[in-house]
Image (tube, rainbow, N blue to C red):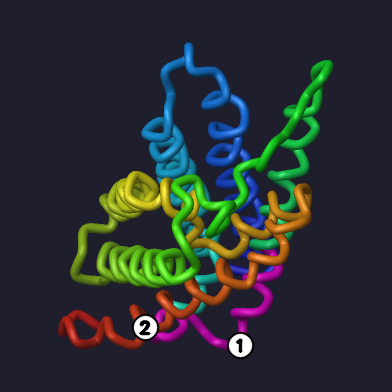
């Protein structure tokens, strides 16, 4: 598949992830009467990945996340020479999704985007968790996410079930960590809304690049220990 097609698929998938996942938090969860809550937000993030894995995963592999791309490269499933191109496409896709969401969220009188679904620690953590807790949870859950992706897409696994396993894993990750960091495990997802909020969302963004990528790298290098490496 030509690289241009694959990059467009990554752009599109990441835009959908940010629009759907962050959109559920910014728009629907802002209205308690809708009953979506943080469990609904967690499900929305899982559904965005699940739907796009089936829609365009056959084109690009369905990464939609720099940590996943780096983890797959570390696991020997993706060429290192294409990592930077994928990451750029993912970040641009995330920004496009956040831009659409911003236009919609500010489309009423007196609109206030608040945190705009950004990630943070300390005073900017939903549960006021500190930097160490944020680092640990983001590294561990990114490790788990990439491990699930490597396993679900292994040649020995049933290919039809990969999207479901990956989507449910991301849902579980959000159910665990929304109170801690508002859940990143994805640098592109964190960068996109932060650009529209600025301030602490930008100054704390480093953690939401470093931790997911470290977790992804560990998962990629360690996956061979399961004895299922291609």
Quadrant where the image shows the C terminus = bottom left
Q: Please, which residue is most extreme toward the top here?
A: 33
Q: Is residue 155 left or right of residue 84?
A: left
State which quarter of the image contains the N terminus. Answer: bottom right
Residue 225 position within the rendered picture, expressed as x and y whole percent measured from the top left: 19, 87
Q: Which mark is residue 137?
A: none
**Quadrant housing residue 107:** top right
Does residue 102 appear in this view?
A: yes
Q: What kind of secondary structure does the magenta stretch mostly adopt?
A: helix
* 11 up-or-down from 137: above or below: above
* Left or right position of 43 against 124: left
Residue 92 within the segment the image draws in magenta: no
Mark 1 and mark 2 lie on one chain; the one further toward the N terminus is: 1
Q: Residue furthest left?
A: 227
Callout 1 environment at 10 Å: few (<14), some (14 to 19), or many (20+)? few
CA neighbours of label 2 inside 10 A, class few (<14), some (14 to 19), many (20+): many
In front of the other: 176 or 19: 176
> Residue 81 has which mark?
1
Labels 1, 2: front one: 2
- Which mark is on residue 218? 2
The residue at the point 43 percent across, 47 percent down is 178
Q: Which residues are magenta?
A: 72-89
Q: CA distance from mark 1 to mark 2?
A: 19 Å
Seen in the picture, residue 109 relative to 55 is either above or below; the reply is above
Point 66% across, 41% down: residue: 116
Residue 166 on image: x %, y %: 34, 54
Left or right: residue 11 versus residue 153 is right
What residue do we see at 16% from left, 84% from top? Answer: 227
Q: Position of residue 214 (x, y in %)?
A: 46, 80
Q: Identify which residue, 89 or 178, lies in the foreground.
A: 178
Asked whether residue 230 appears in the rendered view, the answer is no
């Amino acid at each position: 598949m030509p690289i241009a097609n694959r990059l467009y698929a990554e752009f599109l998938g990441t835009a959908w992830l940010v629009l759907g996942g962050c959109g559920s938090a910014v728009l629907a969860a802002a209205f308690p009467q809708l009953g979506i809550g943080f469990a609904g937000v967690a499900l929305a993030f899982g559904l965005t990945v699940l739907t796009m894995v089936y829609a365009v995963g056959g084109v690009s592999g369905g990464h939609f996340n720099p940590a996943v791309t780096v983890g797959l490269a570390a696991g020997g499933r993706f060429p290192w020479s294409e990592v930077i191109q994928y990451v750029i496409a993912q970040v641009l896709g995330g920004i496009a999704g956040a831009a659409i969401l911003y236009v919609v969220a500010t489309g009423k009188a007196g609109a206030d985007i608040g945190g705009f679904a950004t990630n943070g620690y300390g005073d900017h953590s939903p549960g006021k968790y500190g930097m160490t807790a944020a680092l640990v949870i983001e590294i561990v859950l990114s490790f788990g996410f990439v491990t699930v992706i490597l396993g679900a897409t292994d040649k020995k696994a049933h290919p039809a079930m990969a999207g479901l396993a990956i989507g449910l894993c991301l849902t579980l990750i959000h159910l665990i960590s929304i109170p801690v960091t508002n859940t990143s495990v994805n640098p592109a997802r964190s960068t996109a809304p932060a650009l529209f909020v600025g301030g602490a969302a930008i100054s704390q963004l480093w953690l939401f690049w470093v931790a997911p990528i470290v977790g992804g790298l560990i998962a990629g290098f360690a996956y061979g220990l399961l004895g299922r490496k291609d």
